[in-house]
Amino acid sequence: MPERLEPGRIHVAVDILIFTVREGRLSLLLARRKNPPFRNYWALPGRFVGLEESAEAAVRKLLAEMLPVRDVYMEQLYTFTALNRDPRGRTISMAYMIILPWQKLQAALEEEDVQLRCFGVNHDAGGLYLTAEGEEAITLTAGDLAFDHGEIIRTGVTRLQGKIDYTDVSFRFLSDTAAFSLSELQTVFEAVLDTPVDSSNFRRSIRGRYEQSGRIEQTVQAKQQGRGRPAVLYRLVK
């Protein structure tokens, strides 16, 4: 993004939240800013919308520039219009959520030119906390992020938590919607809701909500998960 904006006009940007579930935890990709304002701050990936493109086209172009992935789940989250959200000038941002299974995202992040880092997300009454492990361990709060990106992330997590019980969004986190176990799906629910889920109640609820309605069905496959009988695998009926 440019360091200065043309005065006296409104600028339109897109910011994207790339969500995944990694090791049982809801996670998000951030980039460290290289230029002012907020130089060296962590931020959501974003760019300005060109005169000859839609916001969705700008998101797809940005994603293609950052990650070698295709066929992603994407939805518009919200439009953020606070007057002073960008110190360079009047800017509104259209935020989009993108969901990628960790296996697919992990392979993309291993490309040497990818400049993104995966942060675990905790969002509760105590606030927003983002943590990244590794040689450079990092812990961030909403106020540590560039612009109003803390607010955008909180809005995105709240949207996910609200939608997981009545939409198919949980399946977007699965590496294979044609062969998954209910335990794998439960892991997604627990990661997004950031709380344990009772296994018996969860299975009863999922079967009643999705299997009886024909949205998922059992396959002839099974998967060994620890000791005991192999887990029954399901597929999402599209």
Image (tube, grey):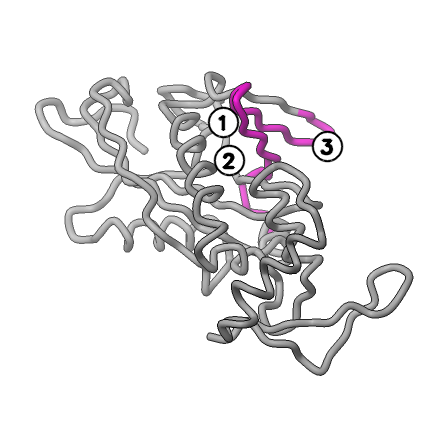
Classify residue 207 by image quadrant. Answer: bottom right
Task: Write down the residue under mark 3.
Answer: 134
Question: Would residue 126 be counted in the magenta stretch?
Answer: yes
* Viewer-closest of 195 and 174: 195
Residues marked 1 and 2 touching at CB (< 8 Å): yes
Residue 138 is left or right of residue 212, and the answer is right
**Front position in the image: 91 or 113:** 91
Give x and y (percent) for residue 70.
Answer: 47, 63
Mark 1 lies on residue: 42
Tell whether position 183 is magenta. no
Label 1: element kind: strand
Horizontal arrangement in the rendering, residue 191 relative to residue 199 (left or right): left
Of marks 2 and 3, which one's residue comes earlier in the chain? 2
Circle 2: element type? strand
Give the amino acid at mark 1. Trp
Which circle's residue, 1 or 2, is located before the other in the chain?
2
Q: Which residue corresponds to mark 2?
A: 30
Disc 3 secondary structure class: loop
The span picked out in magenta is 111-137
